[in-house]
Image: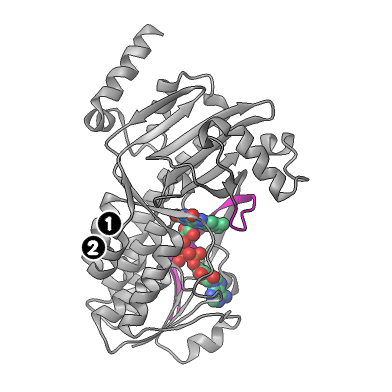
Amino acid sequence: MKIKIIGGGPAGMYFAILMKRARGGHEITIYERNGPDDTFGWGVVFSGKTLAALRRADEPSHAEITRDFEAWDNVDVVHGGDKISIHGNSFSGIARIRLLKILQRRCEELGIAMHFHRDIADVDSVKSDCDLVIDADGVNSFVRESFKQHFQPELSSRPNKYIWYGTNQLFHGLTLTFRETPAGVFAAHSYKFDKTTSTFIVECDPQTWSNAGFGEKPEAETRAYLAEVFAPDVKGHPLLSNNSKWINFVLVKNGRWSSENVALLGDALHTAHFSIGSGTKLAMEDAIALKRCFDDTSDVSVALRRFEEVRKPVIEDYQAAAYESMVWFENARQYMNLDPLALAYSLMTRSKRIDYDTLKRRDPAFIAAYESADMKA
Ligand SMILES: Cc1cc2nc3c(=O)[nH]c(=O)nc-3n(C[C@H](O)[C@H](O)[C@H](O)COP(=O)(O)OP(=O)(O)OC[C@H]3O[C@@H](n4cnc5c(N)ncnc54)[C@H](O)[C@@H]3O)c2cc1C
């Protein structure tokens, strides 16, 4: 089969790897607008369950990913001066650039052609001379826009503002920190992803953003302002920028997932709020699911129909959980009167995927402390 892939992110490269492994005769080409060393963002997270799926799908890249990643089992909630740790939540982090380099090397090893600095602006010319086009060009997908009559995308830009920084302060575990200031409430989502660096995403509601004057503040002043807000947490370390800008999260859904021989994959197809740390995971799991649909057939339309049938319910379920989580953070201000244990409980159960019984099983000491604080109140 002749396959062309637009976008050399995790979704596009991982699908190429899995298809080429399955059948060496496939002719696969990836077009990526950036260079091999350009990236944005800091670390990406995977759950224990996702890592097991990656091992089953491709052992060599799984071995590389897990060679020196950072693993933890706690979520820490910091509110006021208190930190509450909740255990039993297995996650690990790796730098996005490291993940991309591992996948690039694996593509090269398998004989997949990767063309960097190739910005695809004409989909018709790509789709005419191949059997399958994978549109893995990310959240602002140009291909999805070009075929919007067919894909029927639904995009909704959410009200909160967020900005993706790094820091050399190491956060052992997923740490959710809340700081109340005269401007309003700021939340930080942080976790370490290598020996020296943590991801540090700051989120706030539009009122707080405007009260703090971020619309007019130059980048360096914004960073200094936020380092001051989170001074007790970053402990003197500066916030590190990687072309970091305030953005609004865009929730992406598509009415249809493919058009003729063109299929959407990863962020181009769907997004889930970063507070459940799942963009990269979902992109790679999409690749696994789509490759499986080609295991029993080489008929592109049959496989693409099957992909939508089996994967859509999984994504809808995930997006529903991520939606609850996103809305919790959009309304963070209203939870600030809770004591730290009650806030931690509310946070842990926000997506409705984890309930009282799950928490009691994972961390009985946390539930005991929560109940005893509740009785005193
Ligand atoms: C600013 C920002 C920072 C982020 N940082 C993190 C992070 O630190 N950790 C994390 O887990 N997630 C992060 N995410 C989310 C994460 O990047 C995605 O959920 C995940 O990478 C999805 O994988 P993907 O392959 O579908 O898309 P992407 O990783 O976005 O890959 C799409 C690729 O397509 C390329 N492309 C786009 N258009 C074209 C075109 N016309 N022609 C050729 N190539 C094209 C892009 O250059 C890109 O390499 C971030 C998102 C944003 C917007």
Q: Amino acid at mark 2?
A: Arg
Residue shown at the point (23%, 63%) measured from the top left: 55
Disc 2 from disc 1: Cα separation: 6 Å
Looking at this view, name the residue that lies furthest to the top: 376
Q: Is mark 2 within 8 Å of ligand 1?
A: no
Is residue 129 something one can see in this rendering? yes
**Image location of residue 180, percent across then percent down:** 60, 26
Q: Which residues are magenta?
A: 241-269
Horizontal side of 244 relative to 350 (left or right) equals right
Quadrant of the frame with the N terminus: bottom left
Count residues near mark 1 (Cα–Cα under 10 Å), then give few for <14, some for 14-19, many for 20+: some
- In this figure, which residue is indicated by the disc labeled 1? 51
Q: Which x, y percent locates residue 188? A: 52, 38
In percent of width and height, residue 162 lies at: 59, 46
Label 1 sits on what residue type? Leu
Instruction: Read off the residue under disc 2.
Output: 55
Residue 50 in the image: above or below residue 140: above
- In the rendered image of this protein, does residue 347 appear above or below residue 304? above
The quadrant of the picture occupied by the C terminus is top left
